[in-house]
Amino acid sequence: MPKNDSRLGRGLSAIFGDIENIEDESKIETISLDLIVKNPYQPREEFNKKELEELSESIKEKGVIQPILVRQVEDKYEIIAGERRFLAAKMAGLNSIPAIVRNISDRESAEIALIENLQRKDLNPIEEAFAYKNLIEKFNYTQEEVAKNISKDRATVSNTLRLLNLPKEIIDMLKKGEITAGHARAILSLKDEDLQKSLASEIKEKKLSVRDAEAKAKNIGSMPEYKQYEEKLKTVFENAKIRYKNNKGKIEITFKDEEELNYILERIGL
């Protein structure tokens, strides 16, 4: 994401400038790794193990070239930006790390952690969505303010937040990279959770493109009143479901034993 200072939060461009273009080495402190703690607002849940190992090997050879950014919280230093370098330094066996200490608020810390990851394209869609949600719920951002601070339009922020409405199984698929955000938006066009899960599984198994997934979703959703008929069926057969895709529909009625099967047959006159 290209930098646009006018669209970053108040003071953030100056803070990032300190990291990226350091002219005064006196600004850099050497801090013990034991005194450094993670950022509670870090949106990224996991770091790629292989990438960490590669960075660790580089640090063993050349040291930490770029300092991390921290803020002092009581007797500790909380990471604002640079957690990957911190973890790799620990992995490399270092006892300390170069750092710049800044006095900033919780709100700015959360904002910087999000922007840093977005600039490096480190976040999966769900981590990004939770980061937006965090800014909105904990720091009273509007969607417009989130969009302005990360240099994206409001619709992008809104669509990303909608991903959190998906079933857990699909959210996990997004986290693992088994489907993309584009696939997920196609899935969200379906209102029924079972249909969403079914389409997600098909996308994963058949490696469907986003365009194919959108076509499938449109086809599945072309019978908008199917739920109404399914509810009617459920008044007689509790486990009844209606499936509709590829211009074909079917009724499924599950049973657990012979007694239930006989009941079903009797109700349909057999």
Image (cartoon, rainbow, N blue to C red):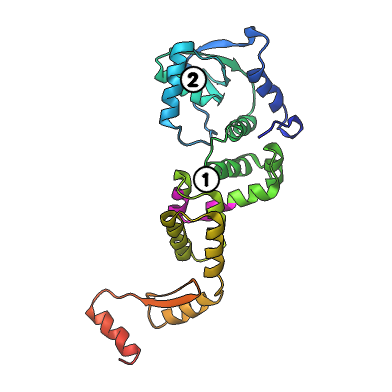
| The N terminus lies in quadrant | top right
Location of residue 2 (image quadrant):
top right
Q: Is residue 243 left or right of residue 98?
A: left
Nearer to us of marks 2 and 1 is 1
> Which residue does the numbered mark 1 point to in the structure image?
126
Residue 123 is situated, as x and y percent measured from the top left of the image, at: 54, 38
Q: Is residue 171 above or below residue 51?
A: below
Q: Is residue 198 above or below residue 2?
A: below
Q: Amino acid at mark 2?
A: Ile
Secondary structure mainly formed by the magenta segment: helix
Which element type, helix, strand or loop, lies under badge 2?
strand
State the residue in front, 98 or 217.
217
Q: Is residue 167 magenta?
A: yes
Q: Is residue 56 magenta?
A: no
Residue at 48 percent of width and 61 percent of height: 196
Cα distance in 3D space between marks 2 and 1: 27 Å
> Which residue does the numbered mark 2 point to in the structure image?
36
Looking at the rendering, the stretch of residues picked out in magenta corresponds to 162-173
Q: Is residue 161 above or below residue 266?
A: above
Disc 2 packing (10 Å; few <14; some 14–19; many ≥20): many
Location of residue 103 (image quadrant):
top right
Q: Is residue 7 left or right of residue 31?
A: right
Disc 1 packing (10 Å; few <14; some 14–19; many ≥20): many
Task: Pick out the residue farthest to the right.
Answer: 6
Residue 160 is situated, as x and y percent measured from the top left of the image, at: 59, 49
- Asked whether the residues under the numbered discs 2 and 1 touch, taking CB atoms below 8 Å apart as contact, a structural biologist would say no
